[in-house]
Image (cartoon, rainbow, N blue to C red):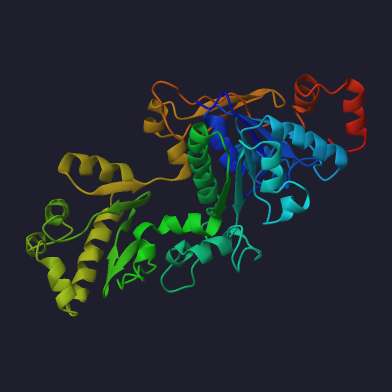
Amino acid sequence: MLSPYRVLDLTTERGLLCGQVLGDLGADVIKIEPPGGSPARQLGPFYRDQPHPDRSLYWWAHNRNKRGITLDIRTPEGGALLKRLVASAHFFIESENPGVLAEAGFGYADLAAINPALVVVSITPFGQDGPKAHYAESDLIIMAASGPLVLTGDDDRAPVRVSVPQGYAHASAQAAVAALIAHHERQRSGLGQHVDVSAQQAAAQATQSGILAAPLGEREFLRLAGGVKMGPVLVRLVWPAKDGHVSIGFLFGSAMAHFTRRLMEWAHEEGFCDAATRDKDWVAMGALFFGAPEMIAEYERLCMIVERFSRSKTKDELLQAALQRGLLIAPVLTLEEVRKSEQLAARGYWQALEHPELGQAVRYPGPFGKFSASPLRYRRRPPTVGEHNHEIYVDELGLAEAQFSELQRKGVI
């Protein structure tokens, strides 16, 4: 879909995903790194636990479908080469702190003067301006400043960060969409523009409607591991099974009572509750809990019945029965179970990419969407350090071999 277009990707680990999304859509993405390779190549874990710039799994996860060159853009020769690349590019993605590239002579005004049709995308912690524009940051700070962190962790302890970085993943995905919106406008006007993406603002969207609760005067969401708080009632949503955990919809009211009734009928069949418990008015139960504090003890008694029952079954036994009996039960899968998922296998989700430097193929997670007329293809594994230097500088920009060697010797590329 984007095969006629070229992307210059100067991002750090903050924005690598943006270029990969555009590359998956078919764009010719050139990853530009400093000589020696991007610091993101030092992020683990590493293939077979061997620290190496070309074996970072973090790098592999964010740089598929890109070509890679090295370039010191702060040298006169390097700056001149970047300007030549900018002249024929369509997108320019960067994630430096505000003003850093401008000091090097590559702010938006400088780039637009070379190529007025260029779409420049900047991904920063808090945006290009405002009182926090130059604040120090990390994924923890971004998630705390944007809201989602207040929801992760146990209710009786401080919030905790989700272990896999989330803030810049949100920012990068939204930056890719924003780049395409700017591209659509360019097709009408012929002009590019500067797209300013704030990771704080992007991550705030992760709370969906939750972020609107306070300004609308509604009750705020509260943190609770494995469930939610509804007034004084701690509603459990995750339960133990014999071999892990499952999500069970043990809920009340007219919409949910029939699922709960069928669950309790099964529990009664197997001797986990008496007939009086099985035959409770599950439609009215929710209103009783909220209107009578003394009923909370009864809710906790019912939860213990459900817990003893769920502990007696495996995740698969609970799932199969849920499908047969019409129950709201879903297994909580481990990463290994996701890897072995029959559903993902049937859809051809896992994609093998050859790593000739390793002499083997590596399985990658599949594309983010399946397009019937123009399927996304994995054309390239992530580039090794400077892998396409000769191809781009000599074959495409026309440098003489002697010039190329001199730039290598001087450490410009």
262 and 400: which is toward the camera? 400
At x 47%, y 73%, the residue is 157
Kindly give the residue lying farthest to the front in the view shown: 189
Q: Is residue 346 left or right of residue 158?
A: left
Q: Is residue 365 left or right of residue 225?
A: right
Quadrant location, the C terminus: top right
Asked if 314 appears above or below 378 in the picture, the reply is: below
395 and 339: which is toward the camera? 395
Residue 373 image point, x, y percent: 40, 20
Q: Is residue 157 left or right of residue 399?
A: left
Residue 302 image point, x, y percent: 20, 65
217 and 122: which is toward the camera? 122
Q: Is residue 376 left or right of residue 219?
A: right
| Residue 186 makes an appearance in the image | yes
Residue 306 image point, x, y percent: 23, 59
Dividing the picture into quarters, in which one does residue 392 lie? top right
